[in-house]
Structures are given as C-alpha cells and as structure tokens.
Image: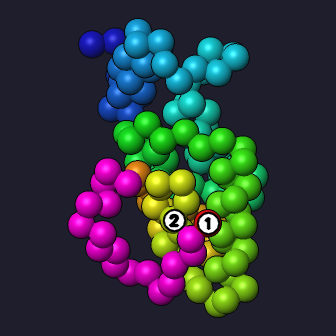
Amino acid sequence: MQINNGNFLSIEQLQDQYLNRQKQTVGKGTDDAGRSFGDILRAQANAGQQLQGVRFSKHAVSRLIDRNIALSDEQLERLNDGFRKASEKGIEEPLVLMDGYAFIVNVPNNTVITAMDQTETKENVFTNIDGAVII
C-alpha cells in the first residue's frame, strides 16, 4: 500500500493509478501530451467545464471510459446540435442517437447523463425519456 505524505491514498486515487498504468501499458488512447482520453474527459467533468457546450455527468464520463467511446470535435458539435433541436421542441430528457451511439441527456442542465454504443442497446428499451433526436 502506498502512503502519500503520511496519508493513505483514497480508493479513487488508487483506482486512477491502476487504470492509468493499464492504459499506458496497452498504449492506446493517449493524446500529444501523453494524457489518456479518459484523464482529459474526467478532468473536464470534475472541473465542471464544458466540452464545446456539452457537459458530461460523472456517470456519463465513467460510461464513456468503460465503453471506450471517444468523441471527435465534429461529433461533439453534432451532439450540441441535438441538444439545441431538443430544446427548441421543448424536450427535456431526450434520447440522442448519433453514429451508432445512444446518449440520454438532460437539456435544461446541458448534460449528458449516460452514453452507450449500439452493442449495448440490444434490448432497445430506453426509460425516463420524453423524446428522441436522431442526428
């Protein structure tokens, strides 16, 4: 067990160290600065910052990382467009379908609640939504 300045590391810190070490070993998902996509996305979410207008809940960030979903700038832009279209129609909790991905979003908070790819939508049952936007 590691000790950090006389204190034990939290479970989250240990988990981050383990996950980061695994990702670096595999050699996938790093940007030019050597940080993984998950690290960047988590940092953005934890700081409460927006990724091109769209925010991701901690749950959504976890799902993106677990499911190896990396969105391009163009996809984030289209997701923002989906938010805008839902808002114009008065939809507050839509399902947004885009490029084989499904997102449940909260329009008033401009937040993605969860994300999945088409392999995880086998049952095709979505609850707690009040509309759908297909981009």
Residue at the extreme bottom of the image, as rendered? 90
- Residue 102: x and y, percent? 46, 61
Instruction: Please tell me whether mark 2 sits on a helix, a strand or a loop.
Output: strand
Q: Residue at x 55, y 59 (%)?
A: 98
From the image, tell me which residue sits under label 2: 97
Image-based side of 127 in relation to 84, left or right:
left
Q: Which element is circle 1 on?
A: loop
Q: Which residue is mark 1?
A: 135
* On-image quarter of the C terminus: bottom right
Number of other residues with Cα within 10 Å of mark 2, as a class: few under 14, some 14 to 19, many 20 or more: many
| Residue 126, image quadrant | bottom left
Q: Is residue 29 left or right of residue 51?
A: left
Amino acid type of disc 1? Ile
Q: Is residue 99 magenta?
A: no
Q: CA distance from mark 1 to mark 2?
A: 6 Å
Q: Of 105 and 85, which appears nearest the observer?
A: 85
Part of the protein shown in magenta: 118-134
* Marks 1 & 2, CB-CB < 8 Å contact: yes
Residue type of the residue flagged with mark 2: Leu
- Residue placed most toward the observer, 112 or 95: 95
Residue 78 position within the rendered picture, expressed as x and y whole percent measured from the top left: 69, 59
Which residue corresponds to the image point at 64% horizontal and 80% vertical from the top-left? 86
Q: Is residue 118 positioned above or below 43 on the image?
A: below
First in sequence: mark 1 vs mark 2: 2
The residue sitting at 48% across, 72% down in the picture is 95
Picture layout, residue 92 above or below residue 7: below
